[in-house]
Amino acid sequence: MSRKKLMEEMTWTELREAMASADTALIPTGSVEVEGPHLPLAVDSIVAMEVARRVADATEGVIVAPLFNVTYSSWHGAFSGTLSLTMPTLMTVMSQICRDLCRHGFKRLFFINSHIGNDASIWNTANDLTAEGLARVGMVSIWPLASEMGQHMSELKENSFLHAGEIMTSVVMAIRPDLVDMSQAVTEYLKPKSEGYQPLLSSKSKVGGRVISIYHTSEELTQSGVMGNPSQASADKGEMIIGNMVEYISQAVDEFRQVPLPPGIGA
């Protein structure tokens, strides 16, 4: 029995053997985009892949599919190095690859997603595959999960996730410290546009005390690509965050694998 968990590192015979006891593909989805002057462009991809690896090590019956690294990040396009597919292209590519995974025998697909720009494509793909009876599909969003868990971590100064802030920087310091240059780290927060208009993200703002969607390009909101304060980040905090996420996601995947398959898929 092959002990490999990454599909791309297996031979086709090893994959066939592994799938005798694995029906679930973990699909890491990231991005290549601005993450401030102190973090690499591939933060989302690096983190999604590492979390997927750790979840696979902790969970039976799963195999890690290849990473979606270049995805949809058009609103960050003014910053050097940001790469983006169009949304229709990403939806087409994601659908085709997922259909191939189903054709090869995976009955469950679970996205480990670290980039909000992937949400719509995953939603579209999941609905189509489910309606057609090809697979049961699930997803966990890494950074919202980290933000929720951060509310209960007294070690953090920024308890909520902010782009390139303390949580993200800490996680990358734990995974790839060689790619973090804290001498270049800057603090930058999103500034109010008017007395009643406070941007929260590129796609969300608070207007009159309530959250609505007002869409901005990143250069309208930040000069550095940072939307928080990375100065208090540390590898120890990052390892704690990752450990908490992996523990929860592993449990969630176990539960996901018990959810009945859509009609038309054999048990």
Image: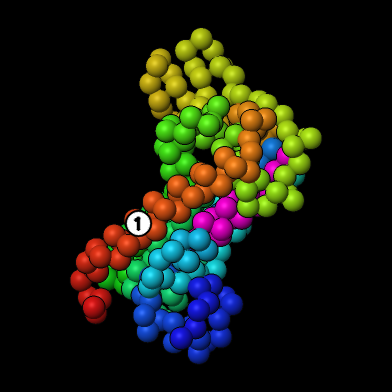
Q: How many marks?
A: 1
Residue at screen point 43% across, 43% down: 145
Q: Specify how the rendered protein is coloured.
A: rainbow
Q: At label 1, which amino acid type do we have?
A: Gln
Is 200 part of what is drawn in magenta? no
What percent of the width, then of the height, locates residue 121? 45, 55
The answer to whether residue 1 is above or below residue 72 is: below
- In this view of the protein, can residue 75 be seen by the observer? no
The part of the chain drawn in magenta is: 38-52
Q: What element carries label 1?
A: helix
* Quadrant of the snapshot with the C terminus: bottom left
Give the side of residue 196 with respect to residue 138, left or right. Answer: right
Residue at screen point 63% across, 43% down: 235
Which residue in the rendered view is the most extreme toward the bottom?
Answer: 13
Residue corresponding to mark 1: 251
Give 103 or 108, whichever is nearer the viewer: 108
The answer to whether residue 213 is above or below residue 132 is: above
Which residue in the rendered view is the most extreme toward the right?
Answer: 183
Give the side of residue 69 with respect to residue 160, left or right. Answer: right
Magenta span dominant secondary structure: helix
Residue at screen point 51% across, 27% down: 200
What percent of the width, then of the height, locates residue 16? 45, 86
Q: How crowded is mark 1: few (under 14 residues within 10 Å), some or many (20 or more)?
A: some
Which residue in the rendered view is the most extreme toward the top?
Answer: 195
- Residue 260's quadrant in the figure? bottom left
